Amino acid sequence: MHAGKLPRDTATGDTRCALVSPTAGTAPGAGAAGASPANVAPARARFGIVYLVGAGPGDPELLTLKAARLLADCDAVVHDHLVGAGVMALVRRDAERHYVGKERSHHTLPQGDINALLVRLAGEGKRVVRLKGGDPFVFGRGGEEAQELARAGVAFEIVPGVTAACGIAASTRIPLTHRDHAQALTFVTGHLRDGTMNLDWPALARPRQTLVVYMGLAALPDLCHQLIAHGRAASTPAAVVQSGTLPGQRSVVGTLGTLARLVAAEGLVPPPLIIVGEVVSVADEVNAMRSIAEAYALAAD
Ligand SMILES: C[S@@+](CC[C@H](N)C(=O)[O-])C[C@H]1O[C@@H](n2cnc3c(N)ncnc32)[C@H](O)[C@@H]1O
């Protein structure tokens, strides 16, 4: 592969890495001398592949067609706690299922063991779907897993998913950008590797931007406090949305000055997404007008 060029499958147009077998040279029939077509195992038995697939924010209908096809066709699926039953129902019935968890501070399997599991399954010649909530490359450790697979010489492909911010923007009708309110959109995590939330507060507090915080519930009081302390108005609209796009979706809407108290009173639980910015108030307007439109539509029935 040449620097600056992405590999592209010429037959399908898919962008992917070169197909390298982790078992090359050791698979049955792959011995140095004397290998012949008769004693070389079929490609599918020798060459595994891992698909890092985004499962979207929860609603199975937000899955890509490609993700649904791979789930129906895989030999093994390795999935996180954020992947719901609706998506798991699409997995091939006789595929191996490996639950690897990953709730905050409660990892069912350490990341190193997850990486090793993926390499092992691919080494057994399996088509493996590593299924992650949202998009695998947005706060999903997809980058770390891709690095490990590349180091181990395992073929892999990335299948994007609808990240929580986009799914929730749609289900709550909060537009993430808006020409009158937000020309910039920033995604941050409220849970850094070392457990701190050491963010660039002056940059995050700048006006005319929407801030989306993943994994930020525990840090919500500090987050609101820091944004106000660095110049964002306490009256800035802000929302926390739990279980976005799922039937149990719950939202709490307030301002930077009130949100932490409101959320504590409502008792929201993970996974919650925090959205800060004037765009949150656009949803109120849109939803109010929608209610009127729905009332007219019902009356006309
Ligand atoms: C480890 S991150 C994974 C993000 C994921 N890769 C994505 O692109 O959405 C987990 C965080 O995503 C957010 N999240 C994911 N799905 C969500 C949902 N359905 N509702 C609310 N927040 C969600 C929460 O902030 C949660 O703590």
Image (cartoon, rainbow, N blue to C red):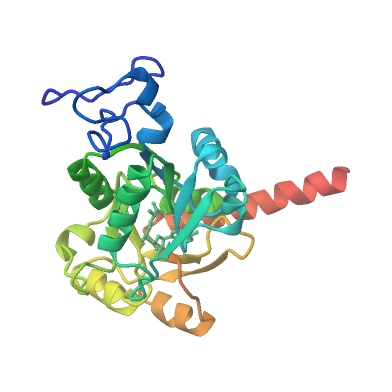
Q: Residue at x 66, y 49 (%)?
A: 290
* Residue furthest to the left: 3
* Residue furthest to the top: 10
From this view, report whether residue 232 is shown above or below residue 95: below
Q: Residue at x 32, y 59 (%)?
A: 114
In this rendered view, identify the residue nearer to me: 120 or 162.
Answer: 120
Q: Quadrant of residue 125?
A: top left
Is residue 42 rendered to the left or right of residue 292? Answer: left
From this view, report whether residue 2 is shown above or below residue 23: above
* Residue furthest to the front: 34
Q: Quadrant of residue 156?
A: top left
Q: What percent of the width, then of the height, locates residue 137?
A: 31, 47
Q: What percent of the width, then of the height, locates residue 238?
A: 41, 65
Q: What percent of the width, then of the height, locates residue 79?
A: 45, 56
Which of the four quarters of the rendered structure image does ligand 1 lie in?
bottom left
Which quadrant is home to the C terminus?
top right
**Would you say residue 181 is visible in this rendering?**
no
Q: Quadrant of residue 15?
A: top left
